[in-house]
Amino acid sequence: MAVVCSNCAGKLIFNPATQRLECATCGSSFRPEDVEDKNADLQSKYYDTRVYVCSHCGAEVITSDTESSTFCVYCGNPAIVFNRIAKEYRPDGLVPFQVTKEEAVRYIKLRFLRNPIIPKEIKSKCVPENLRGIYVPYWIVNADFTEADYIKGEVKRGKRTETRYYSRAGEVKFKNVPIDGSNILNDDISRKLEPFYLEDAKDFDEDYLNGFYSNTSDLNYFDLRASTAYRCHKLFEDEVVKTVKARNIKIMDSIYHVDVQDDPIYMMMPVWFFTFKYDNKPYTVLVNGQTGKVVGTMPWQKKKIYSIAISVFVLTLALCAFLSWASINKLLGMSSFYAQGFAALFTMSSIFFAKGFTGIRRILKNLKLTQSEAIFKFVRKRQE
Ligand SMILES: [Zn+2]
Ligand SMILES: [Zn+2]
């Protein structure tokens, strides 16, 4: 299964920085395509894998690297045990990891950890040893798609607002639509992780998996068709809305149909997982292993969110009071120049106040997605 170094029989690990397989024992390195895996049957549709199962959440993960399977990448519990050797469907290709573990840590730190309100104990957990690289299965699909939409919008006529109705219909030939191939990741999360660029894709070679985990696709044809239809529908909807010149646009009804073309391509995409526990809840932050894009949110200490909201509120109140004081002063002969300045300041602080709140709402929503119960659909499914 796992290939060994031809010089010393040490274990080989794929290094994203050099794109080579490296031997930790003697330091030799090899190109993945030059390493011959004597056990692999390239003609076979299947390849051998070692399946590990988390006895806490039921997640399954495949790895040849037994030493690294010390905790579950999905729930953070150290309850992962070897389950069986299995034959898995051989992917057509994969995008090798290009972001190293150390780079992934740096991206997470840049994105989140410079913020002073992130709890210190989380910062200390964000170290390379706590990251796991997983190849996530995707189907790359070509599809013929048709859709018709009935849309409502508002237009201004002088001072009146009128409701208008629009219809739009079209036909699109979608090429290379990426469909998340496992029930592992929540679809919202996998969409946020994209794009992956297929230009860097290689023919599938088990050697790339050395040192990493992988998952296999558990989608059947009907799931794949449904996911494709939904994905194309969302893309179509985004474009259709742009063609309507109105406000408060709402799609009232849409009918669509998809024909998935034969032989979708089965690919593995690289994703770094950083799983940690905070307040006894598991959280996961993901990093696209090709582009370095970070997806997720850190758990904010809720009282800190409130204290920020309150201080913004107090500031607004103070400005408000100041403004009233200023306008009284104006009555008493203060120049209107200053009064205007205060008015502008007041408007600005109100805008910041409103923006602060939508920002907090967005963070709370993202936070929900980061909590592992929401990020991994299957965990919930299996616990029910
Ligand atoms: Zn060696
Ligand atoms: Zn688990």
Image (cartoon, rainbow, N blue to C red):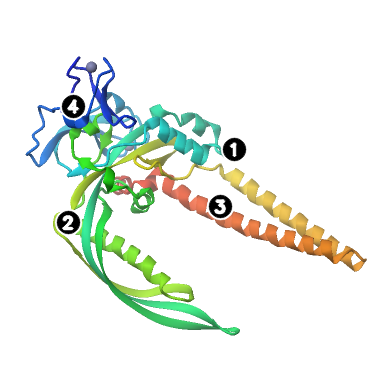
Instruction: Classify residue 122 as left or right of residue 373.
Output: right
Q: Which residue is mark 2?
A: 221
**Mark closest to the chain's N terminus, 4 or 2:** 4
Observer-nearest residue: 209 or 230?
A: 209
**Mark closest to the chain's N terminus, 2 or 3:** 2
Pointers 2 and 3 in contact (C-beta within 8 Å):
no
| Quadrant showing the N terminus | top left
Q: Which residue is mark 1?
A: 116
Looking at the image, which residue is at 27% across and 41% down?
95
Measure the alpha-carbon separation of dots 4 and 2.
31 Å
Label 3: which secondary element: helix
**Mark closest to the chain's N terminus, 1 or 4:** 4
Instruction: Classify residue 217 as left or right of residue 120.
Output: left
Q: Which residue is mark 4?
A: 2
Q: Residues within 10 Å of mark 3 (few under 14, many from 20)?
A: some
Label 4: which secondary element: loop
